Amino acid sequence: MDCIFCEIASGDAQAQVIYENENYKAFLDINPVNYGHTLVIPKTHFDNFLTIPEDKLQGLVKITQFLAGVIKRSLNADGFNIISNNGASAGQSVFHSHFHIIPRFEKDFQMKPQVKMYSENSMNEYADKIRSFVNKYEDLLNAK
């Protein structure tokens, strides 16, 4: 197998599993941002957020929501981040769809990206460009 998450899902690779059912598995990240940083995966391989079928995504989101609450309460965290990196340029290093649950504590670290400012007309231009694709592909959304 080439995918470490598939190996973890099948039990061929070890992980500190905190939740598992027949379709999903959640385990601690070996390179955590904070202690308790958890990865939630479907056991079936999908490359990223865009390739996972809707029914599998719904299950993944439901379990991620449940575990985020459990992690927050069990670690007395002040908050948490839910992150899905998609593509190498977005920081995805394992190309198996997954969510990160990162417990956050007051003043633990600053995760504030440098924001950009739109020029006078560029906000309209970006919105128009995105809306044109929404209109072009909206039938795909309604077909499901």
Image (spheres, grey):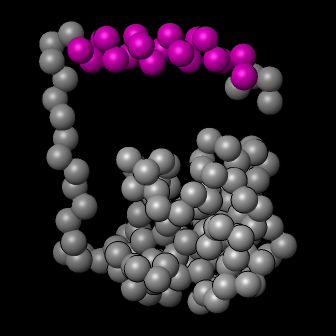
Q: Residue at x 30, y 77 (%)?
A: 105
Question: Is there any visible trace of residue 69 in the rendered image?
Answer: no
Please tell me whether residue 110 belongs to the stretch shown in magenta.
no
Quarter of the figure that contains the C terminus: top right
Magenta-colored segment: predominant secondary structure: helix
Q: Residue at x 41, y 63 (%)?
A: 81
Q: Position of residue 92 (x, y in %)?
A: 46, 57
Q: Is residue 31 left or right of residue 120?
A: right
Q: Residue at x 80, y 67 (%)?
A: 23
Residue 7: percent from left, percent from top: 70, 76
Question: As rendered, which of 70 and 23 lies closer to the eye?
Answer: 23
Quick one: which residue is furthest to the front in this view?
2
The number of discs equals: 0
Along the viewing direction, whichever of 25 and 46 lies nearer the viewer: 46
The reply, left or right, for residue 81 in relation to residue 9 is: left
Q: Position of residue 98 (x, y in %)?
A: 59, 61
43 versus 121 height, above or below: below
Residue 45 placement, left or right of 83:
right
Between 57 and 52, which is closer to the camera in this rendering?
52
Image quadrant occupied by the N terminus: bottom right
Where 88 falls versus 100 (above or below)? above
Say which residue appears at 30% left-offset and 12% top-offset. 124
Res 99 visible: yes
The span picked out in magenta is 122-140
Residue 142 in percent (x, y) is at 75, 22
